[in-house]
Amino acid sequence: MAALLQQIVSGLSTGGVYASLALALVLIYQATGVVNFAQGEMAMFTTYLAWTMINAGWPYWAAFAATLAIAFAAGVLIERVIIRPVENAPVLTIVMVSIGLLTIFNSIAGWIYTYTVKPFPSPFPSTPINLGPTTISLQDLGVGGVSLFVLVVMYVFFRHTTLGLAMRAVVENPVGSRLVGIRVGWMLALGWGLASLVGAVAGMLVAPLVFLEPNMMSGILIYAFASATLGGFNSAGGAVLGGFLMGVIENLVGTYVTFIGTELKLTVALAVILLTLLIKPTGLFGRVAVSRV
Amino acid sequence: MAALLEASNLEAYYGWSKVLHGLRFAVEKDKVTVVLGANGAGKTTLLRAISGMIRTGGEIRFAGERIDGQAPEDIVRRGIAHVPEGRGTFINLTVEENLRLGAYVRKDKTGIREDLDRVFHFFPVLKEKSRNPAGVLSGGEQQMLALARGLMLRPRLLLLDEPSLGLAPVLVMELFRIVRAINESEGVTVLLVEQDAVAALELAHQAYLLETGSIVTSGPAAELRENDSIRRSYLGY
Ligand SMILES: Nc1ncnc2c1ncn2[C@@H]1O[C@H](COP(=O)(O)OP(=O)(O)OP(=O)(O)O)[C@@H](O)[C@H]1O
Ligand SMILES: [Mg+2]
């Protein structure tokens, strides 16, 4: 029983990472109607930037904050320069552009930083602390805590600020949004900026665990897909919950279904995607838009 | 008589097809002006032209300044609220959020708060349902919400696209009574496009008749009510 609880608690920690990346996917999906396949590579690339700053002697949290700022600006820029021209193009075109971005970020990272695996520092010690019947490492607690904090900030932003409201309005009804004066193009760019920012958080938090290399996010991205699918691609809150669930599922399956072990973890994510699409295609919290005719 | 909005030689296009053919009309300050026309006459297009949603030719002046060719986002900022065909409601957002979006371009927080109370006073049903998603409102309630959202801009000019559409006759009367009250007590100039000629001519001061993209008749609403050919083709008595 204690072991089970142990697995759940540490699952919630990686779950925070999946939740962040899933939220990034959903933010862009809602704004553009497509999944941004480059989300993981964008996170990877910004994590390299953090690594560069830390190696240059910056304190961890200064590098963390600077990386978030750069990630945000880069997300806005990518939308303005690369996505904007294809905004009204067929979905397939935008998907291809995002796959193009994925390849570009991957090769540039490989070119600058090589494909050698690098350690990435964690700001949290791995000291275990006792929580009732279970122990949790400060590392896990920190990762879960930071992602939870970022997710709460995002929630407050979208629920309680005029800008957040405007962004939700644009997702739902771009034409009506323009008529009330919202600059739709900038809201979409802002969506990319925020997605890139939460993606960067995920990248920096997970890098100490998976180590830094240009393909470090591929597995994480599949789990983020699974999270968003499970929670519902049109529900930001659902995707976040899906992320935490996936963290737990991953851990439980890895521990208790021995023939899967750690090697076949990706299969678990794919199975979740498949099962969700078969049983409830909108995801647990996804809704079919209410509308009156 | 001062015109708040003036259009001359106004043309409008969807792609290459021209839908408005050189209109001249004026919306007088503090008055209600109605543009009547059958399905496909170009009423919606006329409002879209004013608020910058489509390509136009000719000239549109608002308070003396050219606004043609400007983007909708900038035209709203001049104080023109457009309540579009289909009402433009954000159905997944709450009623109150819809209203707050109406005031999106305003910066005066206390003024917005006051106006929220004011529209709740005009439309008590919206206050009751302020936390509900707008999508669950009835058709009539959604029309009230759309009108209220327009008012939240504290507009100088309110553009209304067939507010009567899909409403029972008593509701249309109720809605037009509110539009009249808003026009009189708040000094909001209104440009209304309508098919329901009986109700609209009752409400309006000035009227235009649009047929396939051209204005065929215009004059004080009271005169158009008496006009025989209009009576036969639009009023049905
Ligand atoms: N988006 C569009 N693309 C191309 N043509 C359009 C478009 N919208 C309207 N039209 C055409 O423009 C003309 C005028 O349409 P408009 O919608 O302005 O008429 P309306 O008077 O508002 O009609 P209704 O009373 O049915 O709303 C019609 O011939 C219509 O087919
Ligand atoms: Mg119309």
Image (cartoon, coloured by chain):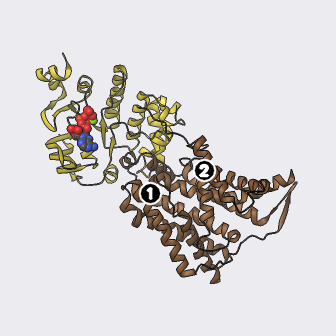
Chain colours: A brown, B yellow
**Would you identify the image quadrant in which residue A219 lies?**
bottom right
Do the residues marked 1 and 2 share a common chain? Answer: yes
Q: Is residue B61 visible?
A: yes
Alpha carbon distance from label 1 to label 2: 27 Å
Q: What's under tag 2, amino acid-wise?
A: Ile
How many residues crowd around disc 1 within 10 Å: few (fewer than 14), some, or many (20 or more)? many
Q: Which label number is shown at residue A23?
A: none
The answer to whether B123 is drawn above or below residue A244 in the figure is above
Q: Which label number is shown at residue A188?
A: 1
**Would you identify the image quadrant in which residue B46 lies?**
top left
Q: How many marks on residues? A: 2
Q: Is residue A230 left or right of residue A98?
A: right
Q: Is residue B28 visible?
A: no
State ligand 1's quadrant: top left
The answer to whether A93 is drawn above or below residue B17 in the figure is below
**Chain letter belonging to callout 2:** A
Q: Earlier in the sequence, mark 1 or mark 2?
A: 1
B139 and A196: which one is in front? A196
Secondary-structure class at tag 2: helix
Q: Which label number is shown at residue A273?
A: 2
- The residue sitting at the bottom extreme is A56
Q: What's under tag 1, amino acid-wise?
A: Leu
Residue B200, position as x, y percentages in the image: 26, 27
B2 and A237: which one is in front? A237
